[in-house]
Amino acid sequence: MSDPIEIKKGDIFKWRYKDTKKHEDYLNYWCCTRTAIANETHLVDTYWSDNSGSHGVESFENALKKWELTFIANMEDLEKIKDWENVYYKDEDIVNLNHSNQSGGAMFKRKGAERSVDVMKEYARRCLERYQSQAESALSSVEEYKKKIGEISSPNVNLEDIYLQMPK
């Protein structure tokens, strides 16, 4: 048997209903991120940052009865970072609390986490691949439009057959 969970202010948990048969309808998770942060007396789903939600807000006692909880971190152990800075750190060092009702500004790293050489190299490699692909596409478009200019200049051209589109 596992140790009982002690909840303290600032604790962050992933949650889901224990009674999956009773709560299998997706509406039971409507307007919920299934991530909750403890205030002084309740676990509050992060979708309802102002505690105004009709569900996804439970007292500690009720949450322990109704929800299966997975501890993520305590807010005291995290440092807020800009959303784009997550690419510098290992996944396990990042706590992303952004969601559909708060799409930015809720990115955190664990205190003491350092930038990862491996993570940064992989991200730089993916950026390089994307830029190389874009460059190849641009070069292909350059050749295509050189041909189109020649076609437009042709004396027997039907301009209705020529399609032009400005790049985005």
Image (cartoon, rainbow, N blue to C red):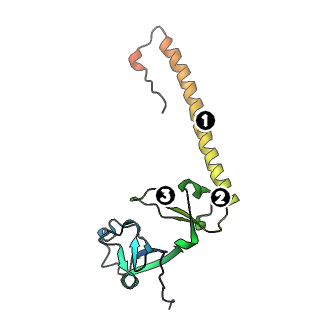
Circles 3, 2 touching at the beta carbon (< 8 Å): no
- Give the amino acid type for the residue marked by disc 1 in the picture: Ala
Q: How crowded is mark 2: few (under 14 residues within 10 Å), some or many (20 or more)?
A: some
Instruction: Say whether disc 3 or disc 2 marks the residue closer to the N-terminus.
Output: 3
**45 sits left or right of 4 in the view:** left
Residue at 65% from the left image edge and 50% from the top image edge: 124
- Decide: few, some or many residues near mark 3? Use Cα within 10 Å; few <14, some 14-19, many ≥20: some
Front in this rendered view, residue 79 or 113: 79
Element at badge 1? helix
Q: Mark 3 points at which residue?
A: 105
Task: Tell me: residue 127, above or below residue 38.
Answer: above
59 shown above or below 25 = below
Residue density around tag 1, few if under 14, some if 14–19, many if 20 or more, within 10 Å? few
Amino acid type assigned to the residue bearing label 2 in the image: Val
Image coordinates for residue 133, horizontal then vertical, percent: 59, 40
Identify residue type, mark 3: Gly
Earlier residue among tags 3 and 1: 3
Residue furthest top in the image: 155
Task: Name the residue carrying label 1.
Answer: 135
Q: How far apart are marks 3 and 1 (CA)?
A: 32 Å
